[in-house]
Structure formats: C-alpha cells, structure tokens
C-alpha cells in the first residue's frame, strides 16, 4: 500500500477536538485565467497551494459544471493531492449523471471520491473511499446564499444521525459577495479522522463551491 503523504497530517495540537482548515478561493484576474487557491490552518498559515487546470472551452462555456484537474502542493512545491472532475450535469433532470470528483493522494493513487446526490430540496454529497464504499455524507441547508452570515454544510455519519464536522462557507462582506468571485471555506473535522478522508474533504470544498456558483450565479463564470 502506498502511504498518504505525511504532510497531510500537519496538526500536532492534541487538546483540540477538531482540526480546522481554511480554503481561500481567490477571484480570477480574467476569463482566461485558471483559479488559484490557498489552504491555511487555523493559525492562518498556508499549508497548501492549489491551481486549477482546464481548457479555454471549459472555462468560458461550461463553467461552473466544467471539467478540471486541481493540483494541490505543499509549501515545498511537492504535489500531494490531485483532484479530477469530469464534465457532468448538475440538474435535477439528470439524477444519474450528477457531479463527481476523484481524489488522488499521492498523485496516481486513488484514495476516494466525492459524489453529488440528487435531492429535490437540499444539496447533498457523499464521501466514498477508494473502493467506492460510502463513508460519510455532507448535507447543506435549503438556502445556500451566504447573505449576512456563514453557511454550514454538515458532515454526517451514513445514517445522518450524528454530525462529526462541517464545511462552512464564510460570509466575507457585502462588497466581496456581490462584486467578486472570491469565496472562503472552512473545514472542521475530528483530529483522528482518517488522513485520506481529510484529503477528500478538501476536495469536497471545490465541488461545493462550483455547484453553489451554479445555483446562485448561473450566468457568472468563475
């Protein structure tokens, strides 16, 4: 078995019940520019940097359901996570062809998937392991527009009875929300959660923000 990079296990504070990562999804400089992201720990220190790779057609005509590859590197420039997203649908009219991400860590070794699930009211996603077995669920609220407050996507057990963490879309102020494509997400999960699942949770942020952009700003390309 190929081990997951130890750089994924950056935390060392035993007294904390939950580990927190903040994903800053910066706005693009232009329609032809690929998105860039910073991933920080709870102290505001950058632990990973991510860059999206896709074609001009995908960026300008398929966004936000575009296909892409996101390469996540540590502070030494070493690639530790690769996220692949094929071109798929994000509509209730195509429940069998919803969004999906494949997560590799290290690159070339699949550790799991994030799959969008059909629901008439709530945004729902499932975390799967490398064998495509369901591990956790992510369930968002009915209203996902962060107007004057944070929006929480709860990370739940498969029976949906227990909440073990959350992915939060932070309210960044009226000006940023209306006039930029920037978005800030935070991940809070148990410290002892499998490091592979933590990597998949990071990837889930990218899928959530792209699907929410389609719901909130269908005419705006990221």
Image (cartoon, rainbow, N blue to C red):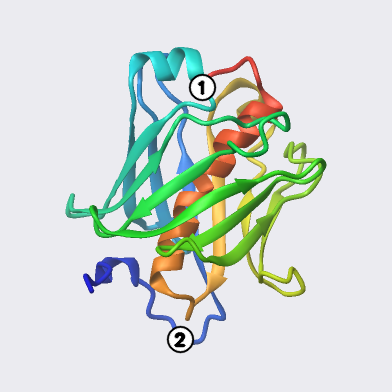
Give above or below for 188 relative to 161. above
Query: Residue 123, position in %: x, y?
Result: 71, 45
Give above or below for 162 relative to 127. below
Query: Going by the image, does 4 lie left or right of 102?
Result: left
> Which structural element holds mark 1?
loop
Query: Going by the image, does 4 lie left or right of 152?
Result: left
Question: Could you say which is closer to the camera, residue 144 or residue 39?
Answer: 144
In the orientation shown, which residue stands out farthest toward the front? 96
Residue found 73% across the figure and 71% down from its top: 159
Residue found 51% across the figure and 52% down from its top: 114
- Contact between marks 2 and 1 (CB within 8 A): the answer is no
> Label 1 crowding class (10 Å Cα cut-off): few <14, some 14-19, many 20+?
many
Q: Earlier in the sequence, mark 2 or mark 1?
A: 2
Query: Going by the image, does 139 lie left or right of 50?
Result: right
Give above or below for 164 relative to 90. below
Query: Residue 56, position in %: x, y?
Result: 35, 15
Query: Can residue 104 be seen in this snapshot?
Result: yes
Question: Could you say which is closer to the camera, residue 126 or residue 184?
Answer: 126
Question: Could you say which is closer to the camera, residue 59 or residue 117?
Answer: 117
Question: Could you say which is closer to the camera, residue 78 or residue 129?
Answer: 129
Query: Residue 125, position in %: x, y?
Result: 62, 52
Q: Quadrant of residue 92?
A: top right
Residue found 61% across the figure and 21% down from its top: 179
Q: Which mark is residue 14?
A: 2
Q: Which mark is residue 123?
A: none
Q: Which mark is residue 63?
A: 1
Residue found 52% across the figure and 48% down from its top: 205
């Amino acid at each position: 078995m190929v081990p997951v990079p130890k750089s994924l296990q950056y935390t060392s504070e035993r007294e904390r019940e939950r580990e927190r990562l903040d994903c800053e999804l910066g706005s693009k400089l232009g329609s032809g520019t690929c998105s860039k992201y910073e991933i920080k720990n709870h102290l505001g220190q950058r632990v990973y940097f991510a860059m999206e790779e896709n074609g001009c057609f995908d960026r300008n005509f398929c966004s936000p359901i575009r296909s892409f590859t996101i390469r996540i590197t540590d502070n030494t420039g070493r690639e530790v996570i690769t996220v692949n997203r094929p071109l798929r649908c994000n509509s209730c009219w195509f429940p069998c062809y919803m969004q999906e991400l494949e997560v590799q860590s290290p690159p070339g070794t699949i550790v799991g998937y994030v799959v969008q699930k059909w629901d008439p009211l709530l945004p729902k996603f499932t975390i799967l392991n490398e064998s495509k077995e369901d591990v956790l669920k992510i369930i968002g609220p009915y209203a996902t527009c962060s107007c004057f407050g944070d929006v929480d996507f709860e990370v739940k057990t498969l029976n949906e009875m227990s909440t073990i963490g959350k992915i939060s879309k932070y309210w960044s102020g009226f000006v940023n929300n209306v006039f930029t494509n920037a978005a800030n997400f935070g991940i809070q999960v148990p410290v002892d959660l499998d490091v592979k699942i933590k990597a998949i949770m990071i990837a889930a942020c990218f899928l959530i923000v792209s699907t929410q952009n389609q719901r909130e700003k269908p005419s705006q390309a990221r």
